[in-house]
Amino acid sequence: MKNKGTRFERDLITQLWREGFAAIRVAGSGVSPFPCPDIVAGNGCIYLAIEVKMRKDLPLYISAEEIMQLEKFSEGFGAVPYIALKLPRKKWKFFTIQMLERTEKNFKVDENVYPLGLDIEEVVGKIIQKRFGEKV
């Protein structure tokens, strides 16, 4: 499963480079004693800290600890934190922490939250879309 995750991370990095962002996978993400996301990217104006997830279907649950670590890194680095989610035969969707639904102990992306996810063009600042039901 780790190889599959690496493949998806590399796919996203390729897309970020195509959008004009320098992007790298962070070695040791998930095992480092320091907070670190899966991918760090930037173009000199916008900096992104991305936690990469893939699922066969929804919902996606994310631990509160993982979200706290992503926020902590992003704050210190000056990056915008995102959860990037890849579902089979779908484009990447990006979620800010505020977009995630809070459960009793964790966070999740379900069928209600997924349609609000941002496309890569929105994340890199190329387009802005307003969605019905979007949390402001």
Image (spheres, grey):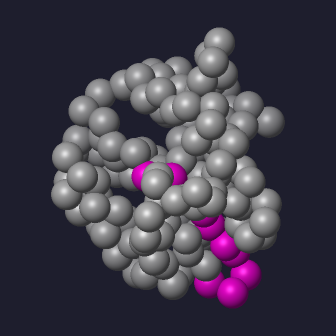
User: Total marks drawn?
Assistant: 0
Indicate the quadrant where residue 63 lies.
Answer: top right
Please provide percent x and percent y for residue 111: 45, 21
Side of 13 relative to 132 (left or right): left
Report the front residue among 74 and 112. Answer: 74
* Vertical side of 4 occupied by 61: above or below: above
The residue located at (53%, 47%) in the rendering is 83
45 inside magenta stretch: yes
Indicate the quadrant where residue 11 lies.
Answer: bottom left
Side of 29 relative to 8 (left or right): right
Most prominent secondary structure in the magenta stretch? Answer: strand
Indicate the quadrant where residue 60 lies.
Answer: top left
Q: Which residues are magenta?
A: 43-52
Side of 54 relative to 100 (left or right): left
Please provide percent x and percent y for residue 119: 49, 54
Please provide percent x and percent y for residue 71: 72, 50
The residue located at (73%, 31%) in the rendering is 135
The residue located at (52%, 32%) in the rendering is 62
* Vertical side of 126 occupied by 80: above or below: above
7 inside magenta stretch: no
Residue 51 visible here: yes
**What residue occupies the far front of the structure in this picture?**
33
Residue 118 visible here: no
**What residue occupies the far top of the structure in this picture?**
104
Side of 76 relative to 110 (left or right): right
The residue located at (71%, 66%) in the rendering is 79
Please provide percent x and percent y for residue 26: 47, 70
User: The C terminus is located in which quarter?
Assistant: top right
Report the front residue among 5 and 132. Answer: 5
